[in-house]
Amino acid sequence: MGEMRIIPSFLFLIIASLTFFSNSFAEIGGYPDPKFEICDEEKKDLIKNAHKKVIDIVNNSSCMSDDLRDKLKKKLNGGITFKCVTWFCKNLCGRETVPVLGSTIGLCPGAFNPDVCGCLEAVELHELIHKGGGYRDEDKPQACELSCFPQCAKAEKNPDGSPKYPPCDCK
């Protein structure tokens, strides 16, 4: 009789675990939901919407190389924390956070103003490429902004108006 109780209890734990994990990881493209530091509710909602678009690009677009896509998927699988920062943000949309190789993306006030930094999803992708792709320079992140979000990226331009980092550099 005691064995009969163990089996249903064991099954209950398995079902409860599966339900928890499916709800936790299924909301945004199969990756853990993002976490937040120092962000108000309005910014959290904006970030969640942008995050969904970035995940869709990473999972379904051909705008980047397979190697970069794999690196970004690994970083997303580990979970991302967004920190709404104001320090050291002069002329920046996003910035490195400590630890540099960690999973926290710093978003400056300009990231939430499309006139200043373009769309938030382009800013997030840019910072994710720094973090997850291991690219410290601006060439790959800016090229990918233009390649993946051409309608709203605000990447640097040359004096003649051409992109400083052409979209093809993302592949």
Image: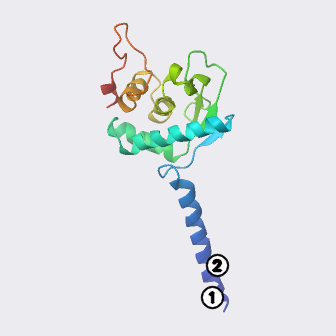
The way the protein has been coloured in the rendering is rainbow
Q: Report x, y in % for residue 64.
A: 34, 35
- Residue pointed to by mark 2: 9
- Residue pointed to by mark 1: 4
Q: Which sits in the foreground, 153 or 103?
A: 153
Contact between labelled residues 1 and 2, with CB atoms less than 8 Å apart: no
Q: Quadrant of the N terminus?
A: bottom right
Residue type, label 2: Ser
Position above or below: 128 against 52: above
Residues at marks 2 and 1, CA–CA distance in whole angstroms: 9 Å
Q: Quadrant of the C terminus?
A: top left
Residues packed near mark 1 inside 10 Å, few (<14), some (14 to 19) or many (20 plus):
few
Name of the residue lying farthest toward the top: 159
Q: Is residue 104 left or right of residue 162?
A: right
Q: Report x, y in % for residue 55.
A: 45, 43
Q: Report x, y in % for residue 7.
A: 60, 82
Residue type, label 1: Met
Q: Report x, y in % for residue 31.
A: 50, 49
Residues packed near mark 2 inside 10 Å, few (<14), some (14 to 19) or many (20 plus):
few
Q: Quadrant of residue 90?
A: top right
Give the residue drawn at x 62%, y 38%. 44
Where disc 2 sits, the SS reads: helix
Upstream in sequence: badge 2 or badge 1: 1
